[in-house]
Image (cartoon, rainbow, N blue to C red):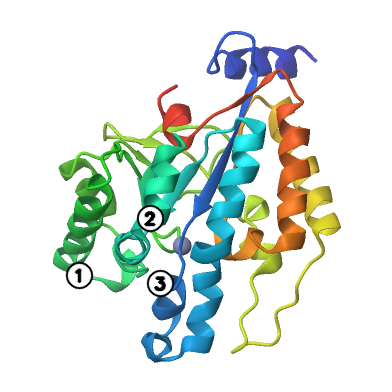
Amino acid sequence: MTTTSSRKGALSRVWPEGTSSAAAFTFDFDAEEVWIGEDPANADRPGVLSQGTYGAKVGVPQILRVLERHGVHATFFIPGRVAERHPARVEEIVAAGHELAHHGYTHTSPTKLSRAEEEAELVRGLEVLRGFGAPVTGYRSPSWDLSAHTLDLLLDHGLRYSSNLMDDIRPYPIEGRPLVEVPISWILDDAAYFWFDGASWTKSIATTADVRAIWEAEFEGIRTLGGAAVFTMHPQIIGRPGRLAFLDSFLSFVTSHDDVWVATAAEIAGRV
Ligand SMILES: [Zn+2]
């Protein structure tokens, strides 16, 4: 009662006038790099890589059409090497007004790199992305995992927010540093339900009805608590035809809530 309602009141002041929670649609545009990151030998396996190419070739253009239909601006986290391989796609993302954000140069977890290697990845990825003329202020690691150096390196190179941690449902200032965390969760990640890898057949492929039920419940829960529902999707996964129809109707569902502020990850970070 009073505790819950006053807590909600305090939380909802975070969001713009007239709204009391937020939602962000974020896309990790991994393309071929995620497969090479899984196993460098995949670089010589066109069949494996083609799963990632689908994201660039078919997934992104179709996702851009769906986003445009709903007037939603999203955030695309992109490895530098994906942007080098598919520059036209990145130009289309920028031209449509979406946010570009950092997702490594290669798709390598910072925990597998030395400090110098991690910094080289960060710098090279930033150079490539900033070459598209859009501001790049956010970083999501290729594994949602941070090394002991990551936060300092983000600050050294002018980044303003991280979107990697799972300890909250709304953005918060990272202690001791002028950086904001825009928290994520596995429950709102399409890969948790749809990621299939031919090398490990133990994984199953969920139906969109399953995912809709889970996402709607989590979205409503976060909305009630005045948080930010940060959805993480991958063009090669959510961009399959049956799932595009799900994305389309799910966007209708989320945007039908007038009290929910639909924003980019950078805009959400900017509320802190
Ligand atoms: Zn990724």
* Residue at 73% over, 33% down: 254
Q: How many numbered markers are drawn?
A: 3
From the viewer's perspective, tell me whether residue 236 is left or right of residue 56. Answer: right
**Residue designated by label 1:** 114
Q: Amino acid at mark 1?
A: Ser
Helix or strand or loop: what does disc 3 sit on? helix
Which residue is outermost to the top? 17
Tell me whether the residue at label 3 lies in contact with that at label 1, contact meaning CB atoms closer than 8 angstroms.
no
Above/below status of 209 relative to 272: below
Going from N to C along the chain, the mark reached first, 3 or 1, is: 3
Q: Amino acid at mark 3?
A: Glu
Ligand 1 closer than 8 Å to the CB at disc 3? yes
- x and y percent of residue 235 in the render? 56, 59
Above/below status of 175 relative to 46: above
Q: Quadrant where the C terminus lies?
A: top left
Helix or strand or loop: what does disc 2 sit on? helix
* Residue at 69% over, 27% down: 225
Going from N to C along the chain, the mark reached first, 2 or 1, is: 2
* Residue 175 in view (yes/no): yes
Tell me whether the residue at label 2 lies in contact with that at label 1, contact meaning CB atoms closer than 8 angstroms.
no
Q: Residues within 10 Å of mark 2 (few under 14, many from 20)?
A: few
**Residue designated by label 3:** 33
Q: Amino acid at mark 2?
A: Ala
- x and y percent of residue 193 in the render? 71, 64
Helix or strand or loop: what does disc 1 sit on? loop
Q: Quadrant where the N terminus lies?
A: top right
Distance from label 2 to label 3 (Cα)? 17 Å
Image depth: mark 2 or mark 1 in front: 2
* Residue at 53% over, 55% down: 60
**Residue designated by label 2:** 88
Image depth: mark 3 or mark 1 in front: 3
Q: Residues within 10 Å of mark 1 (few under 14, many from 20)?
A: few
